[in-house]
Image: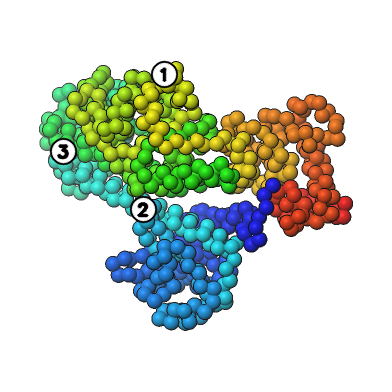
Amino acid sequence: MTHHKKNHPSLADEFSALKSILEGTVSHTGEMFFRALVKTLAKTLNTKGAWITEFDPDLNRLKAISFWMDDHFVEEYEYDISGTPCEQVLERRGLFHVPDNVIGLFPDDPDLEPFEAVSYLGAPILDPDGTLLGHLAVQDTRPMPEQAKNMALFRIFADRASSEMRRIKTEHQLRERENQLSRLVDSVMDAIIEIDSNLTIIQANRAAVKLFEEGDPDKIYAQSFERFLVPNSAVKLKNLLSGLQNREKGNRFLWVPGGFKAVNSQGKEFQSEATLSCYENNRKTYFNLVLRNVSDRIEAEKRIDILKAEKEILKQEIRDIQRFDEIIGASRAVKRVLDDVQRVAETDATVLITGETGTGKELIARAIHKNSRRSTGPLIKVNCAAIPESLIESEFFGHEKGAFTGATDKRKGRFKMADGGTIFLDEIGELPSGLQPKLLRVLQEGEFEPVGSSNPVQVNVRVVAATNRDLAEMVKEGTFREDLFYRLHVFPIAVPPLRKRNDDVILLAEFFINKFSQQTGRRVNAPSPSDIHQLKNYPWPGNIRELQNVIERAVITSSDGDLNLAHMIRGPLPAEYSDTGQNSGNLDRVYTADEMKELERTNLIRALRHTGGKVSGKNGAAALIGIPPTTFASRMKALDIQVPV
């Protein structure tokens, strides 16, 4: 049973705030997102104005990205922060609240009096590395007393604003990478041309435009590349493309024997050397044709591969920032784990995360990385159980060209990609014995040798490993090296199974109900008392992953707003919900919807009798069951229960 302290926001309040944010901003990004956010914030907190700014440290000024005041947007607003309440927010890097007399406390702020300001509340917006990005604030012409509910709701808006500003920053970095890649491709002396399966030119660099003497660069696009080849070479290209598509992935590139005989727009023919590669994107096939000399080809590919890898890392960072399925829980077991995460994240210690399948070990690894000094570096994930044993060494450490059959080019491994950041080795208990001493060397000396090379490569990588197996027992059995075990076991974190987090089951269930309700567009009520008992009494062998799947199915099959949970959980209904002893010996009995409603009605009446008909308050029937009073009253009405009973 959960008791809420007075004035503290309920889950319903927080979900309502989240719903307001999502409804107001889900279809927007960038400037339109912030306009919707500040307008929704002012409405939610019932204030005269709200604004979000970006900070210019060189000028010590704040520039409003969006400013809502007196039912309209204020455009082109910026100000020096000296002597303002906003200066306190940025200096403290935390929430700053002036409930009354803000003009008297900050007489040097020239903008407070024109806005008839009386109260103020602001919060900083920080990058993960602590850099100040700006701040979010509200202002009112009335006193704004400190209320835990409003403070919590304001923090929710601040967190959402921070996520969007960080997303925009990362997206800007991604665009810079793409521009850099474009500049690189345009700067090489050889022609690089991208075509689709119909030979239509999709992209071409400047060298290609010059090579084919197209005066207007735009003219080369959307044309068939067949136009720039003599007939025999056009047939040769088509045959090569067909054969390339039938090759295995990872081997879809070739040096074109004899090259092609090409023809420019002026009709002049010339012989060219060429390489050809194939890739897929959104289920469509594309080809890259490079007309160049051999020495330039090697150097250009190296630089292009590096930029593409960095681009993918930035794309992943954007996806990570937009994730909502963060660690949820208020139980002691979860708090102990989060305390451990906070303590170890600030160090470079190797971490071993243990726990059953589906407990969220990857989320713990992500939290360690995000709260570490390496948070601006990459987080590279490797599932040791998903990589074939014959390829795992190359996947870890990379390989040289010609190191083995199919190694037609040099490749960086995951450890090199993680240099300066964190590598997460999931399912470490599945690591082949032959690779264990090489991993031990990386942990001890920070170096390795790529496959096919005798030259050691130095890396600076923090290792976080995870397993659902008993590594100590594997050491006894001789299937896992003892010295590697102790190198990994520097700071162990045991993630508790869901059955030992009984207090968190309902929190997680309500989170997933809200998530899947939004995704499916279905309106689903809060869990009923029978739902709560089922959720709390089921052992959840699949842990959080199983709970998520159960709730998703229950939402999809819900009827009339009621969560269809009765048939989704594989297990008996708790004894206290058996129907007056009838069929109580049949633990596998499936209850109908009408029977479940009658059981719920009986339980609500029982709670009202225990509390003398009192619904709300600390000793009310709603608190006894563990649901909000509004939900209790709604269920009473739906089940035709009268007070007194």
**Measured from the top left, where is residue 431 in percent x and y?**
39, 24
Please report the residue visible at 15 percent of the width from the left and 24 percent of the height from the top. Answer: 258
Name the spot of residue 362 as percent of width and height, x first: 46, 37
Kind of residue sitting beneath label 1: Thr
Q: Residues within 10 Å of mark 1 (few under 14, many from 20)?
A: some
Q: State the SS at label 2.
A: loop
Is residue 289 depicted above or below 521 in this figure?
above
Q: Amino acid at mark 3?
A: Asp
Label 1: element kind: loop
**Residue on which disc 1 sits:** 479
Looking at marks 2 and 1 on the same chain, the residue that comes earlier in the sequence is marked by 2
Q: Toward which corner of the image does residue 312 lie, by quadrant?
A: top left
**Left-right relation of 62 to 263:** right
User: Of circles 2 and 3, which is in front?
Assistant: 2
Relative placement, left or right, of 583 versus 295 is right
On the question of residue 320 being in view, the answer is no
**Residue 207 visible from this viewpoint:** yes
- Which residue is under mark 2? 129
* Residue at screen point 60% across, 37% down: 500
Name the element at disc 3. loop
Q: Mark 2: which amino acid?
A: Asp
Question: In the rendered image, which residue does mark 3 sit on?
Answer: 190
